[in-house]
Image (cartoon, rainbow, N blue to C red):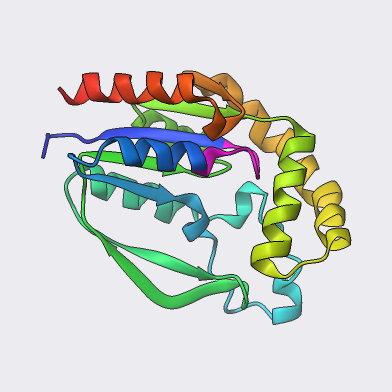
Amino acid sequence: MPKKPIVIGVTGGSGSGKSSVSQQILAQFSDVSVMLLQQDYYYKDQSQIPFEERLRTNYDHPLAFDRDLFYNHLVHLISGQSIEKPVYDYALHTRSDQVIHEEPRDVIIVEGILVLEDERLRDLMDIKVYVDTDDDVRLARRIVRDIKERGRTVDSVVNQYLEVVKPMHHQFIEPTKRYADIIVPEGGYNQVAIDLLTTKIATILS
């Protein structure tokens, strides 16, 4: 393994297609060790908070994340140390007792809605990517996902989007676009941008 792995930050709003971009990058590098470190695993432990209060958690706010643990784990991986990645239980709205053992890799893709919001994380990244997708497209994708995967109703998804997700996006997520090295319109559907990214990573690796 090289002295320092390549660290790629991939961010964008909910439903922007950042996961698709990350997965396509992963698929291009089957011959090197690549890992995906997702910010969603690092929501704060809320086991000391009553369940009714946990239900009101704003998952799109920077304070919802255990920023220090996320940063420290990335530092460990960069320095060649393994980590025990936390697992979040969305049914109980708190961290579960499980962890996932992760070994350091040649390429680390750091993905999440606010990974460019923390200056400490940005300073560790070699390439910073912002996936830029229109609000109406992101809402449509979120409706489909939450109905199919989480058993939500259309009304509940739309209300949450208008009351929390959209305001948080414009307040905290979209402003981080200015830190990006590459802005990818329309996420995983932008094959040209994906090809440029993977070519750049391959160049650094070689």
Q: Which residues are magenta?
A: 12-19
On screen, residue 15 versus residue 79, left or right, reads right
Task: Specify the quadrant of the image occupied by residue 107.
Answer: top left
Kindly identify the residue that appears in the image at 69 percent across and 81 percent down. 50
Is residue 168 part of the magenta span, yes or no?
no
Residue 5, above or below 127:
below
Residue 28, above or below 185:
below
Task: Specify the quadrant of the image occupied by residue 25.
Answer: top left
| Image quadrant containing the N terminus | top left
Predominant SS of the magenta segment: loop
Residue 56, above or below 110:
below
Front position in the image: 199 or 204? 199
Residue 117 seen by the camera: no
Kindly identify the residue that appears in the image at 84 percent across and 59 percent down. 154
Residue 61, above or below 184:
below
Percent x, y of residue 29: 26, 37
Percent x, y of residue 109: 37, 40
On screen, residue 163 versus residue 16, left or right, reads right
Task: Specify the quadrant of the image occupied by residue 174.
Answer: top right
Percent x, y of residue 138: 71, 40
Q: How many marks?
A: 0
Residue 176 seen by the camera: yes
Percent x, y of residue 12: 59, 35
On screen, residue 161 versus residue 126, left or right, reads right
| Image quadrant containing the C terminus | top left
Kindly identify the residue that appears in the image at 46 percent across and 43 percent down. 111
Kindly identify the residue that appears in the image at 68 percent across and 63 percent down. 148
